[in-house]
Amino acid sequence: MPNFDIDSYCRDGYHQLPDMLCNEDQRRAVEFFDALEATGEVASDYEAEYDEADGVRRLRKLRRLLWNDPKLWGPILNRTSCPGLARQVIGDGAAVVFHAAFLKPAYVGSEVTLHQDQALWTCTYPRAFSIWFALTPVSPVNGGLFGCPGSHADGYIPHRDRPHYRWHACLDIADDRLRDPVQFELSPGDAVMWDRFFAHGSAANTSPIDRRGMVVVFADASDPEFRAKDRFLLTDLAALGTV
């Protein structure tokens, strides 16, 4: 278990987690996404999204990783500290409700405007938090990842559509009176976790370096208000083992 300061997490809405993913698992994940992209046709169960520019079409996002290949991803997640963090923050009723790849490809990777995850989800996920794993170096050079400390404190903030932005409704630092964002500079294997109401985003990737990440979301499946399209209880995750 990494050194986790729950008071800092509750105050700021996020917490950085170095060395969460071992080198071998980071390599496995990157090779998996490389191989999937090389097929040219990704199965519909992955709900893939693409970035396109100047005749180049690259994978942008893949969803439902754990549900599509539990024998690969279950042991990888179990070899991290994710299950222990979920028990510490949520309790034994925690469940994985989302597991996706964010692949922001070189040259064409599009901006992800500032937003709260809960505002974009179709279900309300009680006490949910995300863990975002870096699979490549992550910095402002290749699109980066940033978030506004304390932006979770008052819960949901109304989002607005932005002209010419195709992906989702957005927040604005000035209009929504948010604190200046922190840039997360991550090495492969590092991670950052954040509350479901933590406002975050990333810039476009105009560099020659892919910026790849993987996200797992835990929520409280024991809460009476819990509803989810997908769920993977901690007990089910543990049954997949570590090898």
Image (tube, helix red, strand yellow):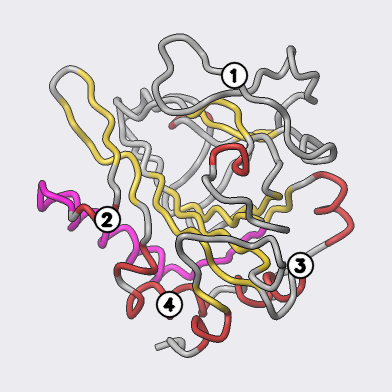
Q: Residue 33, which numbered label?
A: 2
Label pair 3/4, CB-CB below 8 angstroms: no
Q: Which residues are magenta?
A: 17-42
CA separation in Å, label 4 and label 2: 16 Å
Q: Secondary structure at mark 1?
A: loop
Q: Residue beneath label 1, please?
A: 160
**Residue 12: percent from the left, percent from the top?**
82, 44
Q: Which residue is mark 3?
A: 89
Residue tagged 4:
74
The count of marks equals 4
**Neighbourhood count class around disc 1 (C-alpha, 10 Å): few under 14, some 14–19, many 20 upward:** few
60 sits left or right of 18 in the view: left
Q: Quadrant of residue 206?
A: top left
Labels 4, 1: front one: 1
The residue carrying pointer 3 sits among few (fewer than 14), some (14 to 19) or many (20 or more) residues within 10 Å by Cα, namely: some
Disc 3 or 4, which lies upstream in sequence? 4
Category of crowding for the residue at label 4, using alpha-carbon neighbours closer than 10 angstroms: few (below 14), some (14–19), many (at least 20): many
- Which mark lies nearer to you, 1 or 2? 1
- Residue drawn at the location 43% of the way across and 17% of the way down: 165
Q: Quadrant of the C terminus?
A: bottom left
Residue closest to the eye, 91 or 149: 91
The image shows residue 81 at horizontal and vertical percentages of: 62, 74
Where 179 falls versus 161 (above or below)? below
- Spatial CA distance of label 2 from label 3 is 30 Å
Is there CB contact under 8 Å for labels 1 and 2? no
Q: Nearer the viewer, mark 2 or mark 3?
A: 3
Q: What separation in Å lies between label 3 and label 1 (alpha carbons)? A: 30 Å
